Image (cartoon, helix red, strand yellow):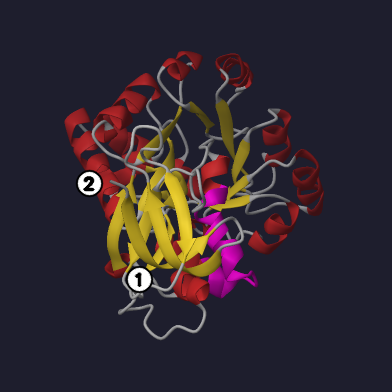
C-alpha cells in the first residue's frame, strides 16, 4: 500500500506551492519513488519540501568543534600540517567515526537527505566515512583525497586547491573512473582560480574572490559552484558574491567544516536569503535540487512524479503558522524544531 503525505507541497524545480497529497510508491515497480503529486483539498497544514542537500562538508572535523578560532585560514585548515590536520592525525579512528556518525545523524534529523564530503586522509579517510554512514539512509557522497586509487572506493575526487599540489593525475583518474572531480577555488584570494579552471572540474567550491572574467568563464563552461557563505565569514575570508554567481551558473549551498560552522542547511538558507537579493525559490533550489546535481545525484532534491521519495515534512503550527509566503517561510524561518518527519526512500 502506498504512503500518502498531505499538506502544502513545494513542487518541481520552480518550487511552486500546491495543496495536496504526495503519493510514495511501496510496490516493487515504484518503491521509493514519488508516484503522484495530487492537487486536492486536504486538512493538514504541514509543509512538504524536498529533503535538503548539503553540497560541501568536512565532517571529519566533527572531532575538533570550536577549535582554531582566530587563526589564519592556512593555519586552520591547509594540508598537511594545519591545526585541523594535526588533530585528525592524532585522533583514533573509532573516535573520528563516532563523531562523524553523530554529525550525520544530526543532519538527517534536520531533514538532510544527502551531503557531499571532501574526505581528508586518503583511503583511510574515505573508509572512515563509509563506516560512519553504512547504516544511514542519508546519501553520503565521498570526494576522496590522496592517491588516485582512492577512487576505487570514493564517489569522486575532492582536491584541496590548485596552490596546494598538482592534481593532473587525479583529474585524469577521475575521468577514467567516470567519477566527479571537485576543487576548492577562490577561498582565500583569486590566485588559485585560474589553476582550478585548468582541471576542467565538475564543480568548484567557494569562489569568494571570483572576478568578472571568472563569472564569464563559469557562464561559458556551466561549471556549478558550491557556496559556503557562513563558514567563509567565520573563517574571515570574506562574503562570496552569491548574486553574481547565480547569474553565471548553478549555485548550491554547503556548510563546509564542522569545526567552526554548524552543519545546518536551514541556517545557511536563512543567511543567504537575508544577506543577498535573491528570490527565495532560488535559495531553496540552492539547498535542494542544485546541490544534488552539483554532487552528481539523480532524481534527488525535487518533488515531482518519478523522483526519489526524499522529503521533509514541516509542522505547519510552529514557525510556519500564519506565513503569507510559504517558500519564504521555509527559507527564512524554518528550522530543526519544525521537522515533523523525514522520509528518505
SS assignment at label 2: helix
Q: In the rendered image of this protein, does residue 135 appear above or below residue 266?
A: above
Comparing 117 with 305, the one in front is: 305
Rendered view: 329 above or below 306: below
**Residue 229 visible in the snapshot:** yes
- Rendering coords of residue 90 (x, y %): 24, 32
- Spatial CA span between label 2 and label 1: 27 Å
Q: Which residues are magenta?
A: 272-290
Judging depth in this view, the residue of 90 and 14 nearest the camera is 14
How many numbered markers are drawn? 2
Q: Quick one: label 1, few (<14), some, or many (20+) residues within 10 Å?
A: many
Left or right: 12, with 309 as reference point: right
Drawn side of residue 282 relative to residue 79, left or right: right
Front position in the image: 167 or 203: 203
Secondary structure that dominates the magenta span: helix
From the viewer's perspective, tell me whether residue 158 is left or right of residue 217.
left
Residue drawn at 32 percent across, 48 percent down: 2
The answer to whether residue 279 is magenta is yes
Q: Is residue 72 left or right of residue 67?
A: right
The mark nearer the N terminus, 2 or 1, is 1
Q: What's the residue at 46%, 21% (across, down)? A: 146
Q: Position of residue 326 (x, y in %)?
A: 48, 75
Find residue 185 and report its horizontal and vertical position in percent. 62, 42
Which mark is on residue 102? 2
Residue appearing at x 67%, y 34% in the figure: 196
Amino acid at each position: 500500500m502506498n504512503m500518502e503525505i498531505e499538506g502544502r507541497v513545494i513542487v518541481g524545480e520552480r518550487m511552486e506551492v500546491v495543496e495536496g497529497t504526495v503519493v510514495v510508491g511501496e510496490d516493487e515497480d515504484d518503491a521509493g519513488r514519488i508516484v503522484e503529486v495530487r492537487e486536492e483539498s486536504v486538512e493538514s497544514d504541514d509543509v512538504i519540501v524536498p529533503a535538503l542537500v548539503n553540497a560541501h562538508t568536512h565532517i571529519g572535523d566533527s572531532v575538533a568543534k570550536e577549535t582554531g578560532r582566530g587563526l589564519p585560514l592556512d593555519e586552520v585548515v591547509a594540508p598537511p600540517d594545519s591545526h585541523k590536520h594535526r588533530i585528525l592525525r592524532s585522533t583514533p579512528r573509532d573516535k573520528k567515526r563516532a563523531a562523524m556518525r553523530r554529525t550525520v545523524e544530526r543532519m538527517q534529523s534536520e531533514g538532510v537527505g544527502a551531503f557531499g564530503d571532501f574526505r581528508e586522509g586518503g583511503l583511510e579517510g574515505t573508509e572512515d566515512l563509509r563506516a560512519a554512514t553504512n547504516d544511514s539512509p542519508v546519501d553520503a557522497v565521498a570526494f576522496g583525497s590522496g592517491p588516485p586509487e582512492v577512487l576505487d572506493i570514493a564517489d569522486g575526487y575532492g582536491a584541496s586547491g590548485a596552490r596546494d599540489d598538482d592534481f593532473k593525475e587525479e583529474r585524469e583518474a577521475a575521468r577514467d573512473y567516470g567519477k566527479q572531480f571537485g576543487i576548492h577555488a577562490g577561498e582565500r584570494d583569486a590566485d588559485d582560480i585560474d589553476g582550478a579552471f585548468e582541471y576542467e572540474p565538475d564543480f568548484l567550491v567557494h569562489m569568494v574572490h571570483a572576478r568578472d572574467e571568472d563569472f564569464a568563464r563559469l557562464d561559458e563552461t556551466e561549471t556549478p559552484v558550491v557556496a559556503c557563505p557562513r563558514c567563509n565569514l567565520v573563517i574571515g575570508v570574506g562574503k562570496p558574491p552569491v548574486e553574481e554567481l547565480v547569474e553565471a551558473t548553478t549555485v548550491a549551498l554547503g556548510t563546509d567544516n564542522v569545526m567552526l560552522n554548524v552543519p545546518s542547511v536551514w541556517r545557511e538558507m536563512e543567511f543567504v536569503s537575508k544577506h543577498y537579493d535573491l528570490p527565495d525559490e532560488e535559495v531553496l533550489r540552492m539547498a535542494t535540487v542544485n546541490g544534488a546535481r552539483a554532487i552528481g545525484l539523480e532524481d534527488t532534491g525535487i518533488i515531482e512524479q518519478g523522483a526519489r521519495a526524499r522529503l521533509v515534512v514541516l509542522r505547519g503550527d510552529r514557525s510556519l503558522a500564519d506565513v503569507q509566503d510559504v517558500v519564504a517561510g521555509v527559507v527564512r524561518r524554518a528550522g530543526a524544531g519544525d521537522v515533523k518527519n523525514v522520509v528518505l526512500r
